[in-house]
Amino acid sequence: MTGPTPLVLMYHGVAQVPRSLDPANIFVTKEAISHQIARLTERHGFRPLTEAQYLAALAGERSVPSNSCLVTFDDGYASVLDEAAPLLAAARVPAICYVSPGLLGAQPDRSEPAASARLDRDGVQALREYGIEIGCHSDLHASMRGMSAERLRAATSVAREEMKALFGHTPRTFAYPYGDHDAAARAAVREAGFECAFATYEGYGRFALPRVDINATDTPFTFDLKLRRLYPFVRRSLGRVPVVRRATHRVVGYAPRQP
Ligand SMILES: [Zn+2]
């Protein structure tokens, strides 16, 4: 496609989880995501795309407004069905949820919050009734950087076939666990037949498209900042200078969390 690709937001789970049980800040509250979706569409006028519309735009088959966006959820937590799906449907916002077929129905271990329970097969199917497409998040959610050719095949083409058998629908897109990828991982995803793949901040073409991570530390101010096209570049440069990043976070603020 020509011009900037649509902005892609990355969420994980939706629950009130104390910071001590969620050190990576991946759970946002229902209130937070509800306000963020309203802010995205009403205040900033973003136009959420379906997976099919996003892929058609990526392929240059249709043009989309420059304020188009795509909402994604990684990991397939049960809270995406219980909390996010109804509010997204009410706001008419489509989304993609990335699941790992080897982890369907997985329950949290002792160190994890109850909210990290994952959807089982029926739960994943139920998402589609809300207009949420299902994408592939590898077979078992291991980092794919430096993976052997055999493991890469299991994480991509075998996982894709398994999802087709489980859900009666072949996933069209892929998201790298932890956003980790290298040239071999990108090639494996392409050869498996996926039409594109999402990383986190670091974009590397169609098979490692950048996303912005929306997490528990976001305030309305940082959320707005992340909707700005320059954000990934700002973050990347700040990421190399931790002192500057800490200072910047002091200025832009963090959302308060239960300790
Ligand atoms: Zn993940």
Image: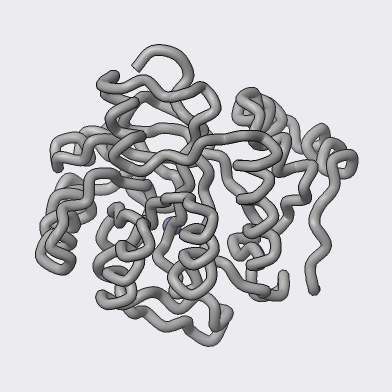
Res 91 visible: yes
Front-most of residues 83 and 42: 42
The image quadrant in which ligand 1 is located: bottom left
* Residue at 42% from the left image edge and 62% from the top image edge: 75
In which quadrant is the C terminus drawn?
bottom right
Answer left or right for 164 relative to 100: left
Res 103 visible: no
Quadrant of the rendered structure where residue 19 is?
bottom right
Residue 256 lies, in percent from the top left, at 83, 62
Residue 121 lies, in percent from the top left, at 26, 75
Front-most of residues 154 and 80: 80
| Colour scheme in use | one colour
* Residue at 79% from the left image edge and 42% from the top image edge: 221
Quadrant of the rendered structure where residue 23 is?
bottom right
Quadrant of the rendered structure where residue 198 is?
top left
Using the image, determine if residue 103 lies above or below residue 190.
Answer: below
* Residue at 66% from the left image edge and 67% from the top image edge: 29
